[in-house]
Image: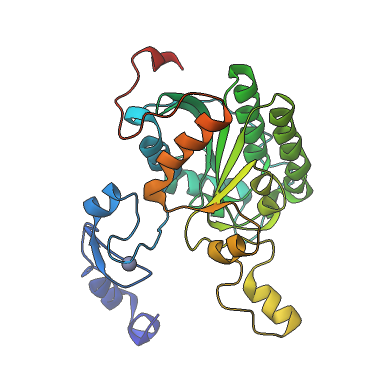
Amino acid sequence: MNWITNYVRPRINSIFSRRETPENLWQKCDGCGTMLFHRELTENLNVCTSCGHHMVIVPRARLTALFDGGVFNEVAVPDPVADPLHFRDQKKYPDRKRAAQKSTGEKEAMLVATGEIGRTPIVAAAQDFSFMAGSMGMYVGNAIIAAAKEAVKLKRPLILFSAAGGARMQEGILSLMQMPRTTVAVQMLKEAGLPYIVVLTHPTTGGVTASYAMLGDVQIAEPGALICFAGPRVIEQTIREKLPEGFQRAEYLLEHGMLDRVTPRTELRDELITITRMLMNLPPEIKGDLPAPEAAAGT
Ligand SMILES: [Zn+2]
């Protein structure tokens, strides 16, 4: 917001805004300010090629990069009740959800899929921060249960990528109920002796951190990811003290024993292949980019 947008009349304002580049061919890195060419950035999984800053990557792009040949099959997630509380803030909840669906092109804040990584069959679930801040509502709860059930049915490990602003307030207590529900889903995997691996991405907060995102057999985080229950600003305001440098960031949590690994996104796929194969007692992995498995078309 500057003096032009504040004070100049709408008609003149629209002339100014028309000056913006029509296609966003370049994206500015939030970390170092370098202008990055969008194709190069996409190829590097939205990690800055100059400073290594990890930008948001949507679940569909993440799963395409993860699975062999970019091939995966989506797992159907049962639809919950649409608007149980008839919640309304500045907007009605269904309107807010529709706007998120339009802007993301996704149905809800989590994508569940099956496929292979380095010829290792897995189930993966990825949360979408761009969809209503990745908030955990009943759909996300259903998605995690569907992912866990699929993993148990197919005897595969589950890899979950978390990204969330917390519980979805528009669903009130029903969103909080997803914490025990998803915890039970994770327990199903443990009872079946199947690995559950969590990759925490920026940011993972609130009720998500307090449930399924912290229950992995292996806890990995992407560099610089904010992982917390209450955010640093809230804590600072409450205790009226300055927090230590890097507090609640992935590297700080690794140093303090809350995580097992901090792994750059570009190395994540190979690492996940190694870990899942080790935990599933499979022979050493096949690394590198693999074409889509022919026999796996139906997996
Ligand atoms: Zn950068």
Colouring used for the render = rainbow
The residue nearer to you, when weighing 157 against 298, is 157
State left or right for residue 22 relative to residue 190: left
Task: Decide: is 15 above or below 207.
Answer: below
Point 51% across, 27% down: residue: 122
Task: Decide: is 138 above or below 18.
Answer: above
- Give percent across and percent down for residue 280: 57, 26
- Give percent across and percent down for residue 220: 55, 49
To which quarter of the image does residue 192 belong?
A: top right
The residue nearer to you, when weighing 291 against 98, is 291
Q: Residue furthest front?
A: 283
Please indicate, yes or no, whether residue 112 appears anywhere in the rendered image. no
- Give percent across and percent down for residue 298: 43, 14
Task: Decide: is 260 above or below 150.
Answer: below
To which quarter of the image does residue 159 belong?
A: top right
Q: How many marks?
A: 0
Q: Quadrant of ligand 1?
A: bottom left
The residue nearer to you, when weighing 215 against 205, is 215
Point 33% across, 80% down: residue: 9
To which quarter of the image does residue 26 belong?
A: bottom left
Point 75% across, 81% down: residue: 239
State left or right for residue 102 relative to residue 185: left
- Give percent across and percent down for residue 151: 60, 24
Q: Quadrant of the N terminus?
A: bottom left
Please indicate, yes or no, whether residue 243 appears anywhere in the rendered image. yes
